[in-house]
Image (cartoon, helix red, strand yellow):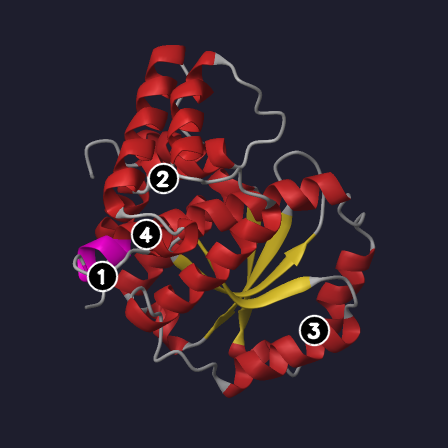
C-alpha cells in the first residue's frame, strides 16, 4: 500500500499528533511531576518504561525511516538518481559540517539536510534535486506542501537545485554561502533533531497501524509494550494536556491554519 497524495499526508500528520505529544512528554527535559505528567508516569512505572533519551529517539527514528522507505510515501522507487548522488557526494566532500542525506522528516524524504542557524525561524536547509517529474501539477502541489511543512514545523528552508545546474558550480556556490553562516550550537541542533525524530516516529506509527494492523506497530516495538498499554499512555497524555490547557503542536496549528476543513 502506498499513501502518496497531499490530502493523505495532511491526514496522517494530523492523526499522528497524539503520539507526537506522547513522545514529547516521554522525552521532555526537566519533566518534573507536575499534574499533567502524573498519570502518564504512573502507567510508565507500572509497565517498566523509562523516560526516553535522545539515543532512544534516534533508534526509533531509524526504525521509522526504514519502515517509511519500504512501505509508504516513496517519492521514487527508493533509488537516488545519478544527479542526486553526484550532488550529495560533491557537497559532503566540500562541506565538513554534519549533514543528513536521503533522510526522513515526518512524512517526507529529504535529499540533503544541512544543520545551520540564522535566527529563530531558520535552523536547517533542505536541498532538493529537481528533475522533470517536479513539473507535474500534482507533484508541484505536494512539493509546495512539503516546503511549508518543513518551514512552519521545523524552521527548515528548502533550496531547489535543477539537474542541469549540478555541473555548473552550484555545489561550490552553496558551500561558500553556508560557510558564512554560524555553525549550530549543540542545544539548537539537539532540539531540532529531537523534533524530527519524534514527528517521523509518530507518522510511521500511524501508517504502520493502518497498513499492518495485526503486526506490532513502530512504537510497540520501540517501547516493547502492547497496543493496549500504548493507547492508555496516549489517552493519558492527550487528556492531561487538555486539562492543563496545553496548546496544539506546531504541526497541528500549521494544518488548521493552512488547510482548515481539508482534513
Q: Choose the circle earlier in sequence order: 4 or 1.
A: 4
Give yes or no for contact between labels 4 and 1 (Cβ–Cβ under 8 Å).
no
105 shown above or below 119? below
Distance from Cα at disc 2 to Cα at disc 4: 8 Å
Q: Which residue is mark 1?
A: 215
Give yes or no for contact between labels 2 and 1 (Cβ–Cβ under 8 Å).
no
Label 4 Cα neighbours within 10 Å, binned few <14 / some 14-19 / many ≥20: many
Q: Nearer the viewer, residue 18 or 155?
A: 18
Q: Which residue is mark 4?
A: 205
Q: Choose the circle earlier in sequence order: 2 or 3.
A: 2
Distance from Cα at disc 2 to Cα at disc 3: 35 Å
85 shown above or below 171? below
Q: Nearer the viewer, mark 4 or mark 3?
A: 4
21 shown above or below 183? above
Image: magenta residue range:
207-212
**Residue 169 is at least partly visible in this image:** no
Q: Nearer the viewer, residue 168 or 251?
A: 251
Taking the spot 51% from the left edge, 14% from the top edge, the residue there is 34
Q: Choose the circle earlier in sequence order: 2 or 1.
A: 2
Taking the spot 32% from the left edge, 44% from the top edge, the residue there is 13
Q: Secondary structure at mark 4?
A: helix
Residue 243 colored in magenta in the image: no
Distance from Cα at disc 4 to Cα at disc 3: 33 Å
Q: Which residue is mark 3?
A: 91
Amino acid at each position: 500500500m502506498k499513501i502518496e497524495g497531499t490530502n493523505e499526508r495532511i491526514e496522517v500528520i494530523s492523526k499522528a499528533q497524539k503520539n507526537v505529544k506522547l513522545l514529547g512528554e516521554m522525552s521532555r527535559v526537566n519533566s518534573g511531576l507536575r499534574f499533567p505528567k502524573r498519570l502518564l508516569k504512573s502507567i510508565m512505572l507500572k509497565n517498566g518504561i523509562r523516560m526516553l533519551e535522545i539515543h532512544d529517539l534516534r533508534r526509533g527514528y531509524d526504525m521509522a525511516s526504514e519502515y517509511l522507505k519500504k512501505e509508504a510515501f516513496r517519492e521514487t522507487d527508493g533509488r537516488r538518481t545519478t544527479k542526486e548522488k553526484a550532488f550529495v557526494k560533491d557537497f559532503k566532500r566540500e562541506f565538513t559540517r554534519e549533514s543528513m542525506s536521503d533522510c526522513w522528516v515526518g512524512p517526507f524524504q529529504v535529499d540533503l539536510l544541512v544543520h545551520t542557524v540564522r535566527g529563530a525561524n531558520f535552523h536547517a536547509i533542505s536541498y532538493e534535486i529537481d528533475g522533470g517529474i517536479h513539473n507535474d501539477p500534482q507533484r508541484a502541489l505536494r512539493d509546495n506542501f512539503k516546503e511549508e511543512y518543513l518551514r512552519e514545523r521545523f524552521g527548515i528552508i528548502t533550496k531547489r537545485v535543477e539537474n542541469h545546474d549540478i555541473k555548473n558550480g552550484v555545489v561550490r556556490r552553496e558551500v561558500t554561502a553556508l560557510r558564512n553562516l554560524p555553525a549550530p550550537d549543540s542545544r539548537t541542533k539537539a532540539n531540532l533533531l529531537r523534533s524530527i525524530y519524534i514527528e517521523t516516529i509518530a507518522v510511521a506509527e500511524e501508517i504502520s497501524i493502518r497498513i499492518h494492523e495485526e503486526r506490532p506497530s513502530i512504537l510497540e516495538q520501540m517501547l516493547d509494550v502492547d497496543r493496549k498499554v500504548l493507547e492508555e499512555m496516549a489517552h493519558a497524555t492527550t487528556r492531561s494536556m487538555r486539562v492543563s490547557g496545553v496548546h496544539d503542536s506546531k504541526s497541528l496549528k500549521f494544518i488548521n491554519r493552512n488547510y482548515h476543513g481539508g482534513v
